[in-house]
Amino acid sequence: MSLVTLLSRTGATLAAVLLTAALAPPAAAAPTPSPAGTPAKPTPGAAATRWAVQPSGPDGPTGRNYFIYDLAPGSTLTDHVGVSNLSDRPLTFQVYGTDAYTTTDGAFALLPADQAATDVGSWIRFDRRSWTVPPGRRADIPFRLSVPANATPGDHAGGVIAAIAQARTTADGQQVRVDQRLAARVYLRVNGDIRPAVTIESVRVSYDNPVNPAAGGDAVVTYRLRNTGNVRVGGTGTVAVNGPFGWELARTAPVDLPELLPGAVFTVTERITGVPPVLRLTAEVDLAPTTVDAALPPVLRSAATWAPPWLLLALLAVLAGWSALRWRRRSTAARATGTEAPGTDADPGTDADPGRTPAGRSPAARRAAGSPTDSPAGTP
């Protein structure tokens, strides 16, 4: 199976570590987040820089894995993010909110630092952006989340980021700016018309026809999913390969799908081995989607491809050709020996009826036609 990158939904608070380098003075593009609570790894050759980000309260961490809210349009609340300095020197962080998206391989990711948030990340406000935390200490930083009155119902995902941007010198003396980020996920559901939905946009199937049909070949099935609803969805997917008349030849084990945010697209590729060539194969995708609240009705879609048993067809063609050639040779030999096959015409020089003359008519018929009759021998 190709392709699937799954993130745990129950682990430690999500965070992201991303190292990107760009020539000074511009800041480097922001990285993809990694699980929260994991200290940022130090850059090679630099002093150790380690910190952690997690949901917190005014008096410290609250044990939450993520920031999860259920609010009405126009609502405002205050919460806290804990930023812990695990290094041996003071660290200054840039703390802000941003939006999330699902990558093509199914990962939860946050917008790069140079891309402005337009959704829930833009609804998060801090009193200031820059915060300095002493070594070995934690700052519980307050922020306000204000939901616009015209916010669309459904799920909105983002993250609260604590980033450090530092100037570094490469081995060849070039000045670069490194942006390191950690984040905690934000899941906000805006009250209103909730419409969970996922579709299978396309299914493609190909078949690697084997030389030996008894060994079977590989069927590769690729299907594309899209979250067309307004809440995040997950679930499992199964692929069945059927022959003519619905004869099931193979079925994959259920595969856990990643969490798809609204509008996200994800492609799954399955390789099924040992599928016999039975002239026509149909691959059917059976999707069992779920939301955080409940299971959704299954979604089905199929596609077909040809799988001719070439070796068997070639053997049948050779056998048919050999039979036709043998019949022709027997027919030719029969004509050469004067022995016709049943149903052939009689020799035109032989009377088919002893009661008829060689001309094909009886004496009475010849007399009726005015032909002279036979006279006795010796009569003039």
Image (cartoon, rainbow, N blue to C red):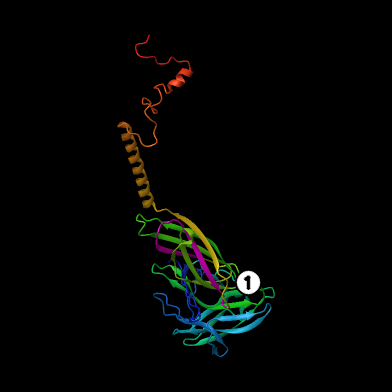
Direction top: furthest residue: 380
72 and 196: which is toward the camera: 196
Q: Give the residue displayed 58% in from the left and 89% down from the top.
A: 58
Is 180 situated above or below 331? below
What span is in magenta? 267-292
Question: Which residue, given by chain and number where applicable, does mark 1 sit on?
Answer: 195
Q: Is residue 366 magenta?
A: no
Q: How many marks?
A: 1
Is 82 situated above or below 26? below
Tell me the SS state at disc 1. loop
Q: Give the residue displayed 34% in from the left and 11% down from the top.
A: 378
**Direction from residue 102 to residue 123 in the image, left or right:** right
Main SS type for the magenta part? strand
Q: Position of residue 337 (x, y in %)?
A: 30, 32
Q: Quadrant of the N terminus?
A: bottom left
**Where on the picture, by quarter, is residue 198?**
bottom right
Check disc 1: other Cα within 10 Å, few if <14, some if 14-19, many if 20+. Answer: few
Tag 1: residue type? Arg
Q: Position of residue 142 (x, y in %)?
A: 59, 84
204 and 168: which is toward the camera: 204
Q: Give the residue displayed 32% in from the left and 31% down from the top.
A: 338
Q: Is residue 285 magenta?
A: yes
Q: Position of residue 306 (x, y in %)?
A: 45, 54
Is 141 situated above or below 326? below
142 and 313: which is toward the camera: 313
Is 310 situated above or below 150? above
Query: Can residue 155 be seen at all in this image of the molecule?
Result: yes
Q: Position of residue 294 (x, y in %)?
A: 57, 77
Query: Can residue 23 be seen at all in this image of the molecule?
Result: no
Q: Quadrant of the C terminus?
A: top left
